[in-house]
Image (cartoon, rainbow, N blue to C red):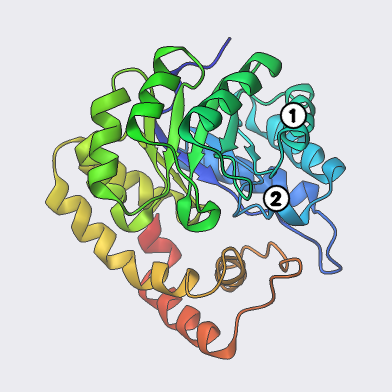
Amino acid sequence: MTLTKDDLHGLFTAIVTPFTADGAVDYEAVKALVKRQLAAGATGIVPIGGTGEYPALSRAERAGVVSACVEAAGGAPVLPGVLSTGYEDALEAGHDFLAAGAAGLMLVTPYYAVGPQEGMRAYFARYRDMVDLPLMAYEIPRRTNAGLSPETYGRLAEDGTIIGMKFSNYDVPGFIATLREAGDQLAVLSGEEPLFATHVALGAKGGVLASASLYPEYWIKVFDLARSGDLAGALEMQHRIDPVLTAIYRETNPGPLKALMKMAGQDVGPVRLPLTAPSAETMAMLTAVLGRIGQSEAA
């Protein structure tokens, strides 16, 4: 069954990539993490994005992670990230993930060599022609220094190039404009925990959230409240987890998130260079917030 925009709703967890103590990919832990997310109510899984340390993995490891996710997902959609800087590398990754059983791909906007809007639109269109998988665009300008305009998203949705997008951007007027241009033709998903409830209330169909690797039930509750029209209740829940977000994003993701998961009894191993273990100051903050939002409260 081919994935459509209507399948992109609710929580898609941007999972971490578990490593063993010596730094190898822990594929059994990948499977366990996927099963935990789906048992909690997540709609699908987004492995090996930024949270999954895409740049630090080899081509074979990326394909292996996707294969493990698909095996564990039991038919739930797996949409791996494709964060390659160049078209040919991205194309290789897409074909690898297609062979591994991915239901779709989350393709980042072109970066480093940043083209005009028409060039970036053509990049997505050509990619979709060459890889027979539905695409979700990934917009994260604070990392890529590049983004697509609401009008470009409208064109990509209208011609069927993409079925959705992850909006990792604090530009609320831009979010509203994107919904106006393309919201009836593609699924817009929030990628920002601090704006998640607001994005859903404005029209987002769900979210692709990194901290859900630890707190899936919590974010599903926030989603349900915001979707039902209780924005005040959703924001109240979101504000309670704000200290957690401050701590886990104090340093480059997913270092602090992995450390917090270990504290909570879900050891997913270290990060790979150039990332390092969190500083002593960040570790102190993580210890404090773990007590504030415990596992029983999240569930």
Residue 91 bears which disc, if any?
1
- The first of marks 2 and 1 along the sequence is 2
Rendering coords of residue 239 (x, y %)? 25, 64
Screen quadrant of the C terminus: bottom left
Q: Is 212 on the left or on the right of 193, as rendered?
A: right
Q: Which residue bears the numbered disc 2?
A: 54
Specify the amino acid type for callout 2: Tyr
Relative to residue 126, is residue 39 depicted above or below? below
Rendering coords of residue 50 (x, y %)? 60, 53
- For the point 72% across and 28% down, the residue is 94
48 or 213: nearer the eye? 48
Q: Which is more foreground, mark 2 or mark 1?
A: 1
Rendering coords of residue 21 (x, y %)? 82, 69
Marks 2 & 1, CB-CB < 8 Å contact: no
Quarter residue 103 falls in: top right
Specify the amino acid type for callout 1: Leu
- For the point 34% across and 28% down, the residue is 151
Neighbour tally class for label 1: few under 14, some 14-19, many 20 plus, Cα within 10 Å: some
User: Tag 1's secondary structure?
Assistant: helix
- Badge count: 2
